[in-house]
Image: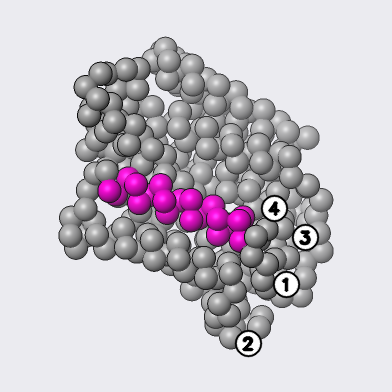
């Protein structure tokens, strides 16, 4: 019931953000943000209850993983919202949160017994850090999509509804950089803790398992993006495109590998 209530709250927040995007009514935006914050608090409460119900960190099933992903995006956005003013950013982020919660809503919610390999203190450390990293990278994805839309508007020189409602290209580029500088170190730490856990569980730091391999591919994508930004001065459209590509790699690593490329991580459903 608490999950359903949280899902409904997020849905209402998303609808209000979309209404605000169209109307630009300040009261609607404030209401949408407050409802989204309420949803984040309810979601965090849900996660705590789920922990006590399961008896372990609930990050081992498809439902729990996607749900925590949505929770990470929510609080990553709220933490940014308190510091940065990015026009209509909440509209795009709320759609991503709603999409993730919809996937979680239609996923099986039963609590499964942990396999021996997952019965470790590394579970909450590795899983939470890795998914939290994905939350910040999801914000970079939203910023990248907004950048590409705004860039297209400027090149067409026919300004539509999007042009007047999206921030400047410079603001969006700075947003992408902030998301990357937080998400990439967390992603790196997630891989390191995963390797340490693998050493404890299977006796080796690396197995070239499909999920490990795609996790490394994702890391290289974002490492390349960060290097290009810092060393060569990449800005703008190329950086936005890489942020979008990197996030699709994140999604494939998180879910696609489990269903298409079975390996030692296959039991994490």
Relative to residue 234, is residue 211 depicted above or below? below
Q: Tell me the mark number nearer the camera, choosing from 4 and 1.
A: 4
Q: Residue at x 58, y 34 (%)?
A: 98
Relative side of 236 to 61, left or right: left
Marks 3 and 2: in contact by CB < 8 Å? no
Relative to residue 90, is residue 189 depicted above or below? below
The location of residue 186, given as percent across then percent down, is 44, 61
Residue indicated by mark 4 = 62
Q: Residue at x 29, y 49 (%)?
A: 239
Query: Looking at the image, is mark 2 or mark 3 earlier in the sequence?
Result: 3
Relative side of 3 to 91, left or right: right
The location of residue 78, given as percent across then percent down, is 45, 38
Question: How far is mark 2 from mark 4, CA to CA?
Answer: 26 Å
Q: Which stretch is magenta? A: 238-257
Residue indicated by mark 2 = 203
The location of residue 45, given as percent across then percent down, is 66, 43
Question: How far is mark 4 from mark 1, CA to CA?
Answer: 18 Å
State the SS at label 2: loop
Query: Looking at the image, is mark 4 or mark 3 earlier in the sequence?
Result: 3
Query: Looking at the image, is mark 4 or mark 1 earlier in the sequence?
Result: 4
* Residue 119 tag number: 1
The location of residue 49, given as percent across then percent down, is 73, 48
């Amino acid at each position: 019931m608490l999950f359903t209530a949280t899902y409904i709250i997020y849905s209402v927040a998303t609808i209000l953000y979309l209404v605000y995007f169209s109307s630009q009514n300040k009261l609607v935006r404030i209401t949408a943000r407050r409802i989204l914050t309420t949803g984040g608090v309810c979601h965090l409460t849900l996660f705590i209850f789920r922990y006590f119900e399961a008896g372990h960190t609930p990050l081992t099933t498809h439902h729990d993983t996607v749900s925590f992903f949505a929770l990470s995006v929510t609080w990553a956005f709220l933490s940014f919202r308190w510091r940065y003013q990015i026009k209509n950013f909440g509209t795009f982020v709320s759609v991503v949160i709603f999409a993730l919660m919809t996937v979680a809503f239609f996923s099986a919610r039963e609590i499964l017994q942990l396999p021996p390999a997952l019965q470790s203190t590394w579970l909450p450390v590795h899983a939470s850090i890795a998914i939290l990293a994905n939350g910040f990278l999801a914000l970079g994805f939203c910023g990248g999509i907004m950048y590409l839309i705004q860039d297209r508007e400027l090149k067409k020189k026919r300004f539509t509804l999007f042009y007047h409602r999206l921030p400047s290209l410079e603001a969006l580029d700075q947003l992408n950089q902030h998301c990357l500088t937080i998400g990439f170190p967390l992603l790196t730490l997630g891989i390191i803790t995963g390797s340490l856990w693998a050493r404890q569980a299977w006796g080796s730091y690396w197995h070239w398992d499909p999920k490990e391999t795609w996790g490394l591919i994702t890391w290289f994508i974002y490492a390349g993006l960060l290097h290009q930004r810092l060393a060569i001065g990449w800005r703008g459209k190329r950086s936005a495109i890489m942020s979008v590509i990197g996030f699709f790699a994140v999604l494939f690593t998180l879910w696609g590998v489990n269903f298409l490329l079975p390996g030692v991580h296959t039991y994490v459903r």
